[in-house]
Image: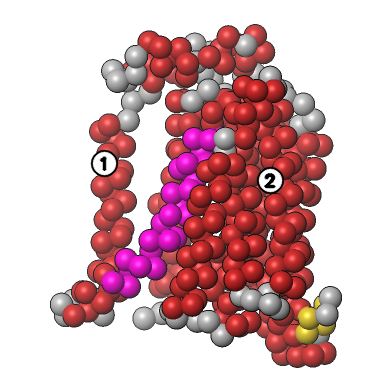
């Protein structure tokens, strides 16, 4: 009935969703050694992409079903059903989740594998025998550490890229090629994009494990090396618009590769938190990173919308790298997105040039 009611509902949704990723990252820190955390994170991170593939298929179907049943306009019950799944998921966590040393299904060999990092003298100083004994760092105290700012800027510089393509990709294919999001071709393009992201991003999370097991690197060094590689994937975005002159499939594939690079980057970035901070503080730092990513996402999406409106109104008077009007504006944003990861990596490396876990006295 009102855009303000819609915004209020979105705020409540955001508050409820906000705890999901910090909790998930803390679980990977509790259940996996450092060398495996990026791989495990990439698996659950891919779940959000799979959801993006399933949602366009199941939600309209639910809405149409309830509309035929005469239950409102249909979409109301679609919200309720999808939201109800969250309560089922929450119930499973509450009643089934236990920490490794308290879980009867974790045997001695598995527990030894999970806790293998404690054999490292440098990590012994930063960790205590059990999570219960760890001293936590308050929210404000976190900001005195350069490691916190490294996570902050790593997320600030890159999360907006992911959310830009997540939000604007359907509009891009509609504006540039006339394929609306509910057309067969539009659905095929978006599905292909997310399918590429889902499959390739999981493999990207394994790279740090390879560097640790095969190259003998420290987990943090191996992770930063992997992040530098993934930071180069978005450079493909520079050719997305030019290649789109030949076919809409090229931008779909290129954006999919860019998105896969982002998800692999994100999995490793989240895992650096477990590398540098005690387990008692992992969720707090993850939340700070998510806040930074939210700020960056707001700025790039708001700025892009304003730029697209301005360029569309200017028409051929607005030009960038051979593209006029709104296509020129898309090219500008693609260029910004393409270099954001390398800039973010350089800032992180400058703030934390070498592995230095935080010790809480």
Establish if 241 lies above or below 289: below
Res 165 → quadrant: bottom right
Image location (x, y in percent) of residue 99: 38, 23
According to the picture, the residue beneath numbered tag 1 turns out to be: 91
Query: Does 52 appear in magenta?
Result: yes
Disc 2 and disc 1 in contact, CB within 8 angstroms: no
Left or right: 282, with 261 as reference point: left
Left or right: 207, with 52 as reference point: right
Res 332 → quadrant: bottom right
Q: Nearer the viewer, residue 332 or 313?
A: 332
Image location (x, y in percent) of residue 142: 64, 33
Image quarter in which the C terminus is found: top right
According to the picture, the residue beneath numbered tag 2 turns out to be: 230
Left or right: 307, with 173 as reference point: right
Establish if 209 lies above or below 346: above
Q: Bounds of the magenta span? A: 38-61
Image quarter in which the N terminus is found: bottom left
Image location (x, y in percent) of residue 98: 33, 26
Q: Main secondary structure of the magenta part?
A: helix
Residue at image point 51% right, 38% down: 41
Establish if 2 lies above or below 197: below
């Amino acid at each position: 009935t009102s855009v303000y009611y819609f915004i209020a509902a979105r705020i409540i949704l955001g508050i409820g969703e906000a705890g999901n990723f910090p909790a998930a990252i803390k679980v990977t820190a509790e259940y996996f050694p450092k060398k495996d955390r990026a791989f495990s994170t990439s698996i659950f991170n891919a779940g959000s992409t799979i959801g993006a593939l399933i949602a366009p298929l199941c939600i309209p179907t639910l809405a149409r079903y309830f509309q035929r049943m005469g239950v409102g306009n249909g979409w109301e019950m679609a919200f309720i059903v999808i939201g109800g799944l969250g309560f089922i998921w929450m119930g499973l966590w509450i009643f089934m989740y236990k920490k490794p040393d308290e879980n009867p299904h974790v045997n001695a060999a598995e527990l030894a594998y999970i806790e293998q990092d404690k054999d490292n003298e440098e990590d012994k100083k930063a960790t205590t025998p059990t999570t219960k004994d760890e001293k936590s760092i308050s929210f404000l105290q976190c900001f005195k550490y350069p490691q916190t700012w490294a996570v902050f800027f790593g997320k600030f510089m890159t999360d907006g890229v992911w959310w830009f393509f997540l939000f604007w990709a359907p509009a891009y294919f509609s504006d540039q090629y006339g394929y609306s999001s509910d057309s067969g071709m539009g659905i095929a393009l978006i599905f292909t994009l997310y399918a590429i992201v889902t499959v390739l991003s999981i493999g990207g999370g394994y790279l740090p494990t390879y560097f640790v097991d095969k190259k003998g690197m420290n987990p943090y060094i191996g992770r930063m090396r992997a992040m530098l590689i993934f930071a180069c994937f978005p450079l493909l975005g520079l050719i997305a618009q030019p290649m789109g002159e030949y076919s809409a499939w090229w931008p779909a594939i290129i954006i999919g590769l860019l998105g896969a690079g982002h998800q692999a980057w994100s999995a490793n970035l989240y895992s650096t938190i477990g590398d540098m901070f005690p387990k008692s503080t992992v969720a707090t730092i993850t939340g700070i990173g998510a806040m930074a990513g939210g700020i960056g996402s707001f700025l790039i999406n708001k700025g892009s919308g304003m730029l697209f409106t301005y360029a569309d109104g200017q028409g051929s008077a607005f030009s960038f790298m051979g593209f006029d009007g709104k296509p020129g504006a898309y090219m500008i944003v693609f260029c910004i997105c393409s270099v954001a990861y390398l800039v973010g990596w350089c800032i992180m490396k400058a703030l934390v040039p070498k592995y230095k876990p935080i010790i809480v006295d």
